[in-house]
């Protein structure tokens, strides 16, 4: 908690340098899956919200630093009509600091790429019978980021972003492999509205 408060104070300080930086807030929702859990599809919904500071490098490029909270994981729903009564949910909550480089393709569209470092703050798994905590997840995550944004007004943008873990979020309980992978990897799509202050 103390670390989170320190990060928020740092962001608040950066926002005060209005001549050097621009900043704002964002929020939206995520659709996630986990490669290696045996289920497919971006079926796990979640929330994402945070704040950002950015600075122009030149007329086309700028960098952006963010502090965000995101819900990720995976989910498999029952399908009784097909005789499938298996339910599973993996719920993960992260605090993350992404660093992103954006390129303005036109006055409306921009593309982004970067990396994120995250800290797992809460997790659980759930099936049709109970909530359980079996195979622990790694506390820290490192992820790649790619995305696109569309400018609605001078203050508002909407964005679509994919965040994919570069290291496993946890190993397999039996210590084995799934194809070439040595653990489970988070794969998340984010749909976000940005508001510049």
Image (cartoon, grey):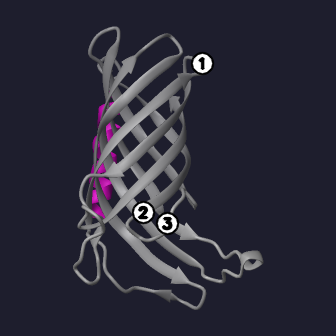
* Local secondary structure at mark 1: loop
Q: Nearer the viewer, residue 35 or 49?
A: 35
Q: Where is residue 34 in the image (x, y as percent from the top left)?
A: 42, 62
For label 1, the residue is 153
Residue contact between numbered discs 3 and 2, judged by CB atoms under 8 Å: yes
Q: Which residue is drawn at 37% across and 86% down?
A: 134
Q: Residue at x 40, y 49 (%)?
A: 68
Q: Crowding near pointer 3: few (<14 within 10 Å), some, many (20+)? A: many
Q: Relative to residue 115, is residue 124 depicted above or below?
A: below
Above or below, comparing residue 55 to residue 193 in the picture = above
Mark with earlier residue (3, 2): 2
Task: Give 192 or 33, whichever is nearer the viewer.
Answer: 33
Farthest residue toward the top?
59
Q: In which quarter of the image is residue 122?
A: bottom left
Dot in front, 2 or 1: 2
Q: In this view, does 8 lie to the left or right of 49?
A: left
Q: Where is residue 70 in the image (x, y as percent from the top left)?
A: 45, 55
Quarter placement of the N terminus: bottom left
Magenta stretch contains residue 5: yes
Q: Does the magenta stretch include residue 93?
A: no
Q: Measure how far apart labels 2 and 1 are at the Cα level.
A: 35 Å
Residue 103: name its quadrant.
top left
Magenta stretch, overall SS: helix
Indicate the position of residue 180 as horizontal and vertical percent values: 24, 61
Q: Is residue 194 left or right of residue 147?
A: right
Callout 3: helix, strand or loop?
Answer: strand
Residue at disc 2, secondary structure: strand
Residue ID for mark 3: 74
Between the residue at mark 3 and the residue at mark 1, the CA separation in whole angstroms equals: 34 Å
From the image, tell me which residue sits under label 2.
34
Residue at point 55%, 90% (across, down) = 130
């Amino acid at each position: 908690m103390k670390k989170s408060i320190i990060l928020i104070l740092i962001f608040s300080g950066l926002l005060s340098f209005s001549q050097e930086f621009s900043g704002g807030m964002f929020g939206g929702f995520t659709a996630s899956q986990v490669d290696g859990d045996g289920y497919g599809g971006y079926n796990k919904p979640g929330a994402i919200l945070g704040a950002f500071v950015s600075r122009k490098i030149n007329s086309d490029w700028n960098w952006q630093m963010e502090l965000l909270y995101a819900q990720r994981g995976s989910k498999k729903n029952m399908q009784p009509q097909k005789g499938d009564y298996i339910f599973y949910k993996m719920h993960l909550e992260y605090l993350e600091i992404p660093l992103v480089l954006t390129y303005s393709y036109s006055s409306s569209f921009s593309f982004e790429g970067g990396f994120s470092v995250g800290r797992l703050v809460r997790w659980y798994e759930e099936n049709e019978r109970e909530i359980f905590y079996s195979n622990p997840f790694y506390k820290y995550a490192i992820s790649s980021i790619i995305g696109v944004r569309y400018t609605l007004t001078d203050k508002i943008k909407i964005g679509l972003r994919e965040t994919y873990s570069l290291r496993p979020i946890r190993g397999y309980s039996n210590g084995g492999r799934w194809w070439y992978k040595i653990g489970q990897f988070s794969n998340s799509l984010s749909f976000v509205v940005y508001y510049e202050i």
